[in-house]
Image (cartoon, helix red, strand yellow):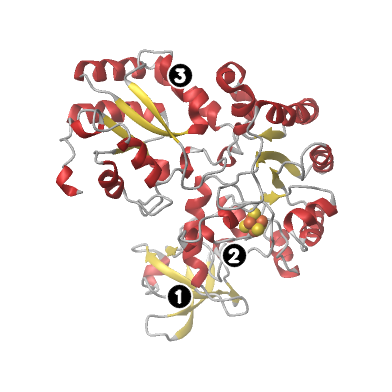
Amino acid sequence: MGIYPPEDIDREAAAKQRGGCGRGEAPRALVRAVVPESPADDAGFEPGCHVTTVDGHPVHDVIDWRWLSADDVIELGYVDLDGDEGVVELEREPGEDWGFEFEGVVFDGVRQCRNACTFCFMRQLPDDMRSSLTLRDDDFRLSFLAGTFVTFTNLGPEDERRIVEQRISPLRLSLHAADPEVRRRMIGKHAQHGIDVLERLLAAGIEFHAQIVLVPDQNDGDVLEDTLSWAYARPGILDVCIVPLGFTKHQSAFDRSFNDPVSSSAVMDLVVPFQRRALAERGSMWAFPADEFYHNAYGPELLENLPPSEHYGDFGMFEDGVGIIRSFVDDWREAERAGLVERCAEVLRAADRRAYYVAGCATRHFLGPLVEAGPLAGLLVPLFVENDFFGGNVDVTGLLCGCDMADAVKSLAPSVAADGGDLFLVPRIVFNDNAVTLDDMSLEDMEKRAGARMSVVSCNASDYLPEIIDLVGRSGPAFDQTNQ
Ligand code: SF4
């Protein structure tokens, strides 16, 4: 798994499904909603019913459902609201939707990981994190549906058969190392089973996006070179991203990653020959160091050295931290060309207000220079927040916690925060679907702790600059200190 927030959202959704039936029990798909006048509605299905089988086959997940219900006439096994079981024939017009909305995407419980990765971020979290954040899933269905990386160490023959038969491809592979002994040391005793499964799936035509979590002195240097060579020799591995070890202060095994220019540059130098070869032979860069390597290698010269958009192709590794900076910079330039940057500066200047934008320290070398070089300098102020909650080298915006953001805003008070005149902007990405941060704080909790009103905005300039203009226009009231 990676340490990027989009996975967290998926993991939280997945965590809710941990209570599903265990392996060995018949799966049941809970119907959450029924589309009016659909075949499901016509057959009398209601929210709260369960679908159990299609044409006699159990339905394990939405992939199974789509596969098994592809015909226009199906026999559906169900359990109704009274708990009575039955089978009904459903028919639809070609192309018509059946009309079921199911709760979740897997119906037989999320497959848990049976590895013991030395670098596992889940094992580095504080003891009191909510359980959905410590879920160590390793489920090929979530890999296909939600883009999580999996090791295949927990796959059985039936899973392999399904993947091949239903063409569940591409999948996302946690590779880390090709050398069997290195891989065993990194992820545990089941490592080779995962590679054996991978080889069989590759031979059957299944494709993969691979990830390497790079750990100093474990799989960097010659090991990384060998791993990339091994992966490149398997064309079914469509591309590889390399992400640096993320470590927190809640562990004692790691105290460094690739956070300095020398070690980051060494990784990129090692990858370049693979990129050149892939570009010539396959028309893409194929191997992608995550953005952190560029950020750490180039520091204040990041913007001049950032690869162009073409480097990232279709940005297929975006959710794993590859190309996010390039995408942000391109969006900022687009906002400049559209006059949004100039307009936002005019509005803030005319209102004699500043907008403080909360951001992780990983944005320091591009967000700061972009703002400072234009008319928003001194008006839009990036508030780079240290992640004290996790500590270590955790510095991306999406992993910022409510306590640290609130304390950073509070540190500006009383000269700024308490007067209600300036804006404190929190990017939406720090909240989950339930509108709480990783440390379970709502916006209201953060406001009380900071003693200042805060506003949630988007993550890209083309979205949040108009939002700032709108917020200034609305001129919200000063924060009510009596709320504290
Ligand atoms: S132990 Fe390894 S495979 Fe399992 S959740 Fe942690 S990093 Fe992922």
Which residue carries the number 1 mark? 50
Beta carbon of the mark 2 residue lies under 8 A of ligand 1: no
The reply to whether dot 2 and dot 1 touch (C-beta < 8 Å) is: no
The answer to which of 166 and 437 lies nearer the viewer is 437
Q: Secondary structure at mark 1?
A: strand
Label 3 and label 2: CA atoms lie apart by 47 Å
In the rendered structure, the answer to whether residue 449 lies left or right of residue 289 reads left
In the rendered structure, the answer to whether residue 209 lies left or right of residue 18 reads right
**Callout 3: 10 Å neighbours few (<14), some, many (20+)?**
some
Amino acid carrying mark 3 in the image: Leu
Label 2 and label 1: CA atoms lie apart by 15 Å
Label 3 and label 1: CA atoms lie apart by 53 Å
Residue at the spot 61% in from the left edge and 39% down from the top edge: 317
**Callout 2: 10 Å neighbours few (<14), some, many (20+)?**
some
Residue 284 visible to the viewer: no
Which residue carries the number 2 mark? 64
Amino acid carrying mark 2 in the image: Asp
Residue 371 x %, y %: 41, 19
In the rendered structure, the answer to whether residue 188 lies left or right of residue 34 reads right
Q: Secondary structure at mark 3?
A: helix
Residue 59 visible to the viewer: yes
Q: Is residue 282 above or below residue 84?
A: above
Which residue carries the number 3 mark? 370
**Callout 1: 10 Å neighbours few (<14), some, many (20+)?**
many
Residue at the spot 71% in from the left edge and 47% down from the top edge: 208
Mark sitting on residue 394: none
